[in-house]
Structures are given as structure tokens and as C-alpha cells.
Amino acid sequence: MTSNTPESRASIWNPNRQTNKLIERVVKWIFGAFAFISILTTLGIILSLIFETIAFFIELQQLDGKQIWDFFFDGRWTPLFRSQGFGIFVLISATIMTSGIAILVALPIGLLAAIYLSEYANAKVRKVVKPVLEVLAGIPSVVFGYFALLFVTPLLRSFMPFVEPFNALSAGLVLGIFIMPLIASLSEDAIYSVPQSVRDGSYALGATKRETVLSVVLPAALSGIVASVILGVSRAIGETMVVTLAAGQNPRLGFNPFVSVQTMTSYIVQVSLGDTPAGTIEYKTLFAVGMTLFAITLSLNIFSFWFVRRFREEYE
């Protein structure tokens, strides 16, 4: 038998939520703590890079005939040799070259695939192809590296015998295949998110399918497409195994794609193998190169963030 007093009726409409409120506060603090841990971890990485890079530049100035600007303008990168050179642009030029070749491959293929999936493919095809693209993005990069070394390079040398066994061309081509699923998937999301009413408005004005895609849909999704491309460029610049296995480890200044080169990530792998004594200037170059790589990718991400906010289209 239930009581029907005014107090019991009030408890039904105003239940005691103190326990739930306490749990909500605990959950909020736990989530906030994990977010704070990620921020502290990132800050610790940045500070360690900064301190070790400063130590590298201080020691660089103590070498005979070396100055800070040699790091930016020297035409040789040979810190592990007897005749040492510290010109970081040698590694930057190789990184730019392999990443540029990768974008030349990945951008047209990825963008056209995204347009097809979003605008032309039926629901069944999209349901199959989109997950396949996302699975391709999860293949380990070392697999792509051996694919470049054992298949693409022999194929290139079969009709271009002047190509060296380790070269930037095969590394860039396979690097483009490696980042293509990322660009295609993110660009497809950006294009697919354009409201159907925008397309219908274009059709109502007499535009064809091609005109609607090129003149209405793609400009509306431009910010998302550019963000996906910049993310793909950042991925190409920071990729390690493909360029290490296919491009070699020969630091050479220039933009010849048919010869062996060494990118920034390849040099980091070389020093990290354990043969370089810790605490030496050769070892500290590891952090100087890492700091340069971090600065480049951070600049790209800041540009992407600005571009997306500047040109983002909002629909109600």
C-alpha cells in the first residue's frame, strides 16, 4: 500500500538527484584529467625538442668555422662524416621533392574518386567502395615501402635504366598511393555534406550535372577539400618507412627524382638505429631535424585551420 501524502507526491516530481550529480562531476573531472594529460604530453614533447635544439645550436657554434646560419645555408648535410656539414636544406629539398610527387599522384586520383563516390556512384557502390578506401588507409607504411622497392623501382628501371636502385621517384609515387585514400575519404565527406538543396537550386536554374558539380558543389566544399589535401601533405612529409626503404639514405642537394636522396624522416631513422653516441652533436642533430619537421607540419596545420575558418560555407 502506497502513501498518498503531499510529501510522497512531491518526491515523485522532485526526485533526489544528488548521486547522479556527484557521478556527473566525477566523470567530468576524469575526462578533463585525460584531456589535460594529452596537452601536457604534447607540451613536454615540444619543450624537449626546443631545449635539445638550443643545445645543438650552442654546440654548433663551438665547432671550428661553424655558425648558426650554416644550418640553413650550408649545401652539405654530413654530420656523421669526418668533414661535417649541417645544411638542413639538403634534407628539406628531398622531403619537398618526395612529398610533391606524392601530391601530384594523390590529389587528382583522390579528388576524382571523391567526386565519383559523392555525386555519381549509387548507394550500393558507395557502400562498398568507401570502406575499402578507408581500409587501404590502414595498411602499414612498411608494406608500401617494400612495394616501392621491390615492384615500382624495378618497373621504372625496366624502361628508364638510368634510375638508381634507390630513388625519389618511386618513393614519391608510392607515397602518393599511400596518402590517396586519406584525401579521397575526407574530400568525399566534405562534398557529400553539401546540402541537397544547393544542388536542387542549381538544377532549377537549368544547370547540368557537370556544371552543378564543378560550379556549385566543389566551391561549396572547398574548405574541406583543401583541409584534406593539407592533411595528406602533412602525412607525406612525416612518413618514414616508404621514403627510408625506397629513396635511400644519400643526403644530396637538388631536385633530381631519379637518384637516391635522404629525407628528414630517413635521417631520423638513421640516427635512431643506435650507432650514434648520445650527447654528441651528431646525436643532437636528431632533435634539430625533428624540430624543423615539427615547425613545417605545424605551419601547414595552422594554414589549414585558417583556411577552413576563412572559407567555410555554413548552411541552415
Image (cartoon, rainbow, N blue to C red):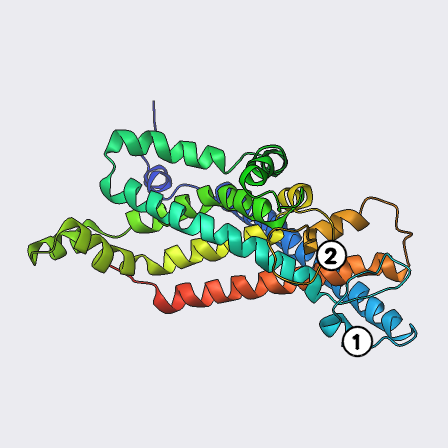
Task: Tell me if residue 32 can be seen.
Answer: no
For the residue pair 18 and 175, the one nearer the viewer reads as: 175
Q: Report x, y in % for residue 281.
A: 88, 62
Residue topped by disc 2: 251
CA gap, disc 1 and disc 2: 20 Å
Please rate how many residues cluster around mark 2, counting C-alpha atoms within 10 Å: few if below 14, some from 14 to 19, many from 20: many
Task: Tell me if residue 275 can be seen.
Answer: yes
Q: Residue at x 64, y 52 (%)?
A: 38
The answer to whether 251 is drawn above or below residue 123 in the figure is below
Q: Quadrant of residue 39?
A: bottom right
Question: Left or right: 203 with respect to 136?
Answer: left
Label 1 or label 2, whichever comes before in sequence order: 1
Q: Residue at x 22, y 60 (%)?
A: 215
Q: Residue at x 32, y 31 (%)?
A: 127
Amino acid type of the residue tagged 2 in the rendering: Pro
Q: Report x, y in % for residue 110.
A: 40, 46
The answer to whether 135 is drawn above or below residue 113 in the figure is above
Marks 1 and 2: CB-CB under 8 Å?
no
Residue 166, numbered label:
none
Element class at badge 2: loop
Instruction: Give the quadrant of the C terminus.
Output: bottom left
Looking at the rendered image, the disc whose residue lies closer to the viewer, 1 or 2, is 2
Q: Residue at x 66, y 56 (%)?
A: 42
Amino acid type of the residue tagged 1 in the rendering: Ile
Q: Report x, y in % for residue 314.
A: 29, 61
Residue 68, numbered label:
1
For the residue pair 169 and 20, the one nearer the viewer reads as: 169
Of all residues, the one furthest to the top in this rendering is 1
Element class at badge 1: loop
Q: Report x, y in % for residue 95.
A: 62, 57
Instruction: Give the quadrant of the N terminus.
Output: top left
